[in-house]
Amino acid sequence: MTLTHVFSTRRVGSFTRASGRRATLVSIPSVRVVGGGLATKASHNGNNSNSNSNSTDANNGDGSNHNNSNNDGVRRSALRALVASIATIGVAAQSRTAVAAPESTSVDWANLSDEEWQKQLGGPGALSYRVLRKAATEPPFTSPLNKEYSPGTFVCAGCGSSLFDSSAKFNSGTGWPSFTQALPGAVDESEDRSIVFMPRTEVSCHTCHGHLGHVFPDGPAPTGLRYCMNGAALVFVKGAIP
């Protein structure tokens, strides 16, 4: 006798995994095994499974009846096909969930409005806002970062971009956190003539264009530069940043 398995599936709902991704619950309402005019039906609705071991649906086209052993064999074949189908669909659903793209959380830091920056940095009176967005200078010897020499990274207080490695920090005696160099591509430099008789080179965050301080050619080896930064424009993160 030749057995043919006919499967049907449908989507009955969804749930949210602990990871935050959604997965689909799939039900297999029926598996029908057909062979030589004999048909036996097993159903599965996601909550219970009914199997009537005593029932027989005997109709071979000429009115003859099959014995119980034949019916048991057919039922076992149907149940094996049902279990295999559930396992296959479960693996496929898991694979689709694993490759789901996360939602984007990127921010266009270079184009935030002044109002958005005030909210980001604590209001118009906050020192970080006045330094980063209005190019103010904090009083010397007031920032706790001036004496911070632990291993780690100094990042922008506005957007969080990495700016200086702690290994480049030195004590300049000026009262402002000072560094011999910035991380590659982390800062931009431009001419500053806000003081007419003393042109300087302004240093700003490459990502959000926030004002950080100035760089002078009077630093120690190996660069001979002194990146004189406002502590209010920085946040120190201990340890390596991945």
Image (cartoon, rainbow, N blue to C red):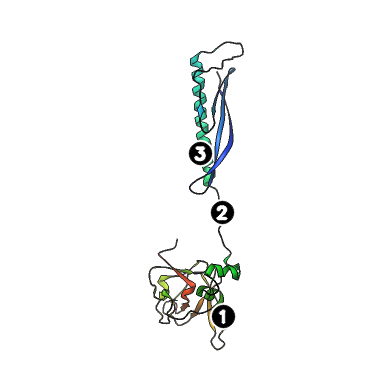
Local SS, label 1: strand
- Looking at the image, which is closer to me, 85 or 117? 117
Q: What distance separates the C-alpha of mark 2 from that of mark 3? A: 24 Å
Q: What distance separates the C-alpha of mark 1 from that of mark 2? A: 39 Å
Q: What distance separates the C-alpha of mark 1 from that of mark 3? A: 60 Å
Name which quarter of the figure residue 135 lies in: bottom right
Image position of 110 (left or right of 169): right
Image position of 220 (left or right of 210): left
> Badge 3: few (under 14), some or many (20 or more) residues near its Cα, within 10 Å?
few
| Residue that numbered label 1 is attached to | 191
- The type of residue carrying mark 2 is Glu
Residue 172 at x, y percent in the picture: 41, 80
Label total for image? 3
The numbered mark, 1 or 2, whose residue comes first in the sequence reads 2
- The type of residue carrying mark 1 is Glu
Local SS, label 2: loop
Check the picture and name the quadrant holding the N terminus. Answer: top right
| Residue that numbered label 3 is attached to | 91
Residue 75 at x, y percent in the picture: 51, 22
Say whether residue 211 is visible.
no
| Residue that numbered label 2 is attached to | 103
Q: Are marks 1 and 2 in contact (CB under 8 Å)?
A: no
* Mark 2 vs mark 3: in front: 2
Q: Residue at x 52, y 35 (%)?
A: 88
* Mark 1 vs mark 2: in front: 2
Residue 9 at x, y percent in the picture: 58, 33
Check the picture and name the quadrant holding the C terminus. Answer: bottom left
Q: Which mark is residue 231?
A: none
Say whether residue 26 is visible.
yes
- Looking at the image, which is closer to me, 15 or 103? 15
- The type of residue carrying mark 3 is Val
